[in-house]
């Protein structure tokens, strides 16, 4: 993959103007549609001359060397490898910087992808819902796109990675999915498909937030990390709404799981609607501020999503592709019955009776289901079933 000189220059222009654009983030969509020289004149009035001279000396080969030294690939909108879906944006990113096998970009054209986005400070319900959606969609062969933020984004990526057999990515308190520190990356880097795509606000070589470093490494190995900014660029606030348009454009459907009334996830949904893509939302508790965004979307005509099967039906048509969990089919009858009881809201003695288990056997079965990842226990001790539900 490669990028032309002019598109590479655009990346440097945005990098040089990063601080100036911070004060103009309310009209970032309009500004990103401006040519380089006009953009410099509009947001960097006092430094316009200096910046123009810097851009006039732009060395494309040096920029390519910089990108390569960071272990990043780059593709521009002049290339046949560039995702055609992005061209529907009013301001398509001139370049995409890629961390991960670049061939995975082609899989986004072969199969529709789904964006799962939402609140950073999500509830345990939101985290589990996003994780389940990510796992079930990836298990059905659908690429999951998100922004690797705390909360809903990270949970969706983690679920997709689990479904792909990359090993569990433990959920953290308050929505943080992992602690930093990197660690060994599991095998599978040569996989042709793309399990999940993380679109970052800053450079594709900079895990953000830092607490998601391990998640970033897993995504980079099993999926793809994407940014429109050159490597080394640190995130600024304007970059988040800017990257949201890319998340929406890469995806056939955008699903919002928990979002406050002014959440950035709603920006992603707005871009999706403007592009003519479908928008879905997961309902929540009516009294929760985290339900305000999804409920407003549903009230405005968005699809109501209660599980991954709803998304698959929208993508492929009702019943054309189904959520399948082969692990659940291999459970012993009593364990499967216990899981069904828990799935229906029964707990303790009632669930054990439903499964034909005594108290000791029931507790042992629950412990085994927890270890296998079929159920999770919340901070209050309540059990939540994970993975695909029978329909």
Image: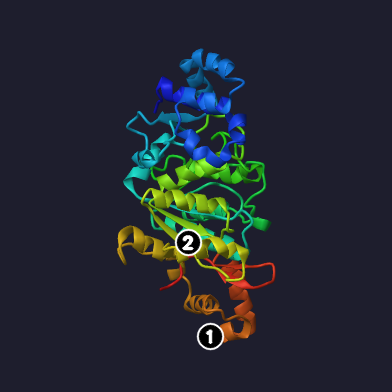
Residues tagged 2 and 1 counted as in contact (Cβ below 8 A): no
For label 1, the residue is 354
- Looking at the figure, which quarter contains the C terminus? bottom left
x and y percentages locating residue 151 in the rendered image: 60, 54
Q: Earlier in the sequence, mark 2 or mark 1?
A: 2
**Camera-nearest residue between 118 and 270:** 270
x and y percentages locating residue 78 in the rendered image: 35, 28
Assess disc 1: are there few (<14), some (14-19) or many (≥20) residues with their C-alpha within 10 Å of its C-alpha.
some
Image point (43%, 36%), residue name: 91
Image point (59%, 16%), residue name: 50
For label 2, the residue is 297
Quarter of the image for residue 351 reads bottom right
In this picture, is 15 found above or below 139? above
Determine whether the residue tagged by mark 2 lies in a helix, strand or loop.
helix
- Looking at the figure, which quarter contains the N terminus? top left
Assess disc 2: are there few (<14), some (14-19) or many (≥20) residues with their C-alpha within 10 Å of its C-alpha.
many
x and y percentages locating residue 166 in the rendered image: 51, 50
Image point (47%, 44%), residue name: 245
**Camera-nearest residue between 230 and 320:** 230
């Amino acid at each position: 993959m490669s990028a032309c000189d002019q598109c590479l220059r655009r990346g440097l222009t945005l990098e040089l103007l990063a601080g100036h654009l911070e004060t103009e983030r309310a009209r970032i969509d309009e500004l990103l549609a401006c040519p380089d020289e006009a953009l410099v004149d509009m947001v960097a009035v006092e430094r316009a001359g200096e910046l123009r001279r810097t851009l006039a000396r732009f060395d494309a080969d040096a920029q390519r060397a910089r990108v390569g030294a960071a272990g990043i690939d780059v593709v521009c909108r002049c290339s046949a490898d560039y995702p055609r879906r992005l061209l529907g944006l009013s301001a398509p990113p001139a370049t995409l910087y890629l961390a991960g096998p670049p061939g995975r970009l082609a899989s986004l054209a072969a199969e529709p992808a789904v964006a799962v986005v939402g609140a950073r400070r999500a509830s345990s319900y939101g985290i589990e819902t996003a994780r389940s959606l990510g796992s079930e969609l990836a298990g059905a062969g659908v690429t999951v796109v998100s922004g690797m933020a705390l909360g809903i984004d990270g949970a969706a990526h983690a679920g997709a990675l689990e479904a792909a057999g990359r090993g569990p990515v433990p959920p953290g308190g308050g929505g943080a999915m992992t602690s930093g520190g990197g660690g060994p990356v599991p095998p599978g880097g040569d996989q042709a498909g793309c399990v999940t795509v993380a679109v970052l606000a800053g450079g594709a070589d900079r895990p953000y937030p830092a607490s998601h470093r391990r998640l970033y490494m897993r995504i980079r190995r099993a999926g793809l990390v994407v940014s429109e900014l050159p490597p080394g660029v640190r995130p600024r606030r304007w970059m988040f709404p800017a990257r949201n348009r890319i998340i929406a454009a890469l995806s056939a459907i955008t699903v919002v799981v928990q979002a406050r009334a002014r959440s950035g996830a709603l920006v992603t949904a707005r871009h999706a609607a403007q592009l003519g893509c479908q928008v879905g939302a997961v309902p929540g508790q009516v009294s929760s501020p985290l339900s305000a965004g999804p409920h407003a979307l549903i009230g405005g005509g968005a699809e109501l999503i209660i599980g991954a099967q709803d998304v698959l039906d929208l993508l492929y048509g009702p019943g054309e592709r189904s959520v399948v969990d082969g692990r659940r089919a291999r459970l012993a009858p009593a364990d499967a019955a216990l899981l069904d009881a828990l799935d229906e809201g029964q707990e303790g003695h009632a669930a054990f009776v439903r499964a034909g288990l005594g108290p000791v056997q029931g507790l042992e079965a629950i412990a085994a289901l927890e270890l296998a990842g079929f159920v999770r226990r919340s901070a209050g001790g309540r059990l939540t079933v994970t993975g695909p539900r029978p329909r």
